[in-house]
Amino acid sequence: MTKNMQMTLVAHGALVFLAGMLAGFPFASVLVASLDPAATTMWPGDVRAWKMAHMEGALNGMLMIAVAAAMAHAAMGAGMQKIIVWGLIVTGWGNIVASVVSAMTGGRGLGFTGLDWNSLTFTLFMLAIIGVVAAMMAVAVAAFRNRN
């Protein structure tokens, strides 16, 4: 993987990770409000949704950085690099944005329900699934091709 593609993936991974950390603030606020009847929160949504948003950012960001590190010395063509890098960028951003939108709007993103926030989250999650499947298939092919 070229240095440019590697660093592009690392940079996006770090930003997705940071977005997940930011989602931890509403997660903590909603969690405290759910445990203490006297506590209030300005954030909509429930604990489950904010926990998911927090974890999506952290896990997707780490995945992006880990793949960038693992593929640093793997020889591969430009097309395979693009599949890995852009597939994971779509996955990372798709998952964190969909999770935050879902937490803010009360949607689950489990199906298309018309022109609404839930359908946006569903679409983003589907794009993320396509991106990660394509990227990880390319990672597996590249890894097998680069064995000694």
Image: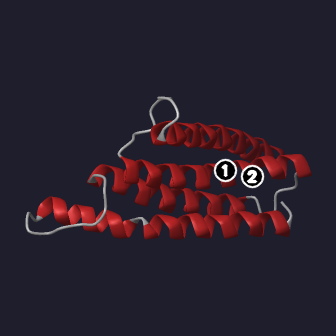
Question: Quick check: 80 left or right of 84?
Answer: right
Element type at marker 2? helix
- Nearest the viewer among 113 and 67 is 113
Place of residue 104 in the rendered image (x, y in percent of width and height, measured from the top left) = 39, 54
Which sits in the foreground, 25 or 73? 25
Residue lying at the far right of the rendered structure: 77
94 lies above or below 42:
above
Position of residue 104 relative to residue 112, above or below, is: below
27 over 126 or under it: above or below: below
Residue shown at 77%/44% (left/top)?
Answer: 144
Q: Residue at 87% of width from left, 55% of height from top? A: 75
Q: Position of residue 95 (x, y in %)?
A: 54, 50
Q: Position of residue 1 (x, y in %)?
A: 83, 60
- The residue lying toward the viewer, choosing from 109 and 57, is 109
The dot on residue 90 is 1
What's under tag 2, amino acid-wise? Trp
- Display colour scheme: secondary structure
The answer to the question of whether label 1 and label 2 lie on touching residues, with beta carbons closer than 8 A, is yes
Residue drawn at 61 percent across, 43 percent down? 128
Q: Residue shown at 46%/39% (left/top)?
A: 118
Judging by the rendered image, the residue that carries numbered circle 2 is 86
Q: Residues within 10 Å of mark 1 (few under 14, many from 20)?
A: many
Q: Is residue 18 left or right of residue 25?
A: right
Total of numbered circles in the picture? 2
Residue type highlighted by circle 1: Val
Quick check: 33 left or right of 114? left
Q: Circle 1 sits in a helix, a strand or a loop, which is it?
A: helix
Decide: few, some or many residues near mark 2? Use Cα within 10 Å; few <14, some 14-19, many ≥20: some
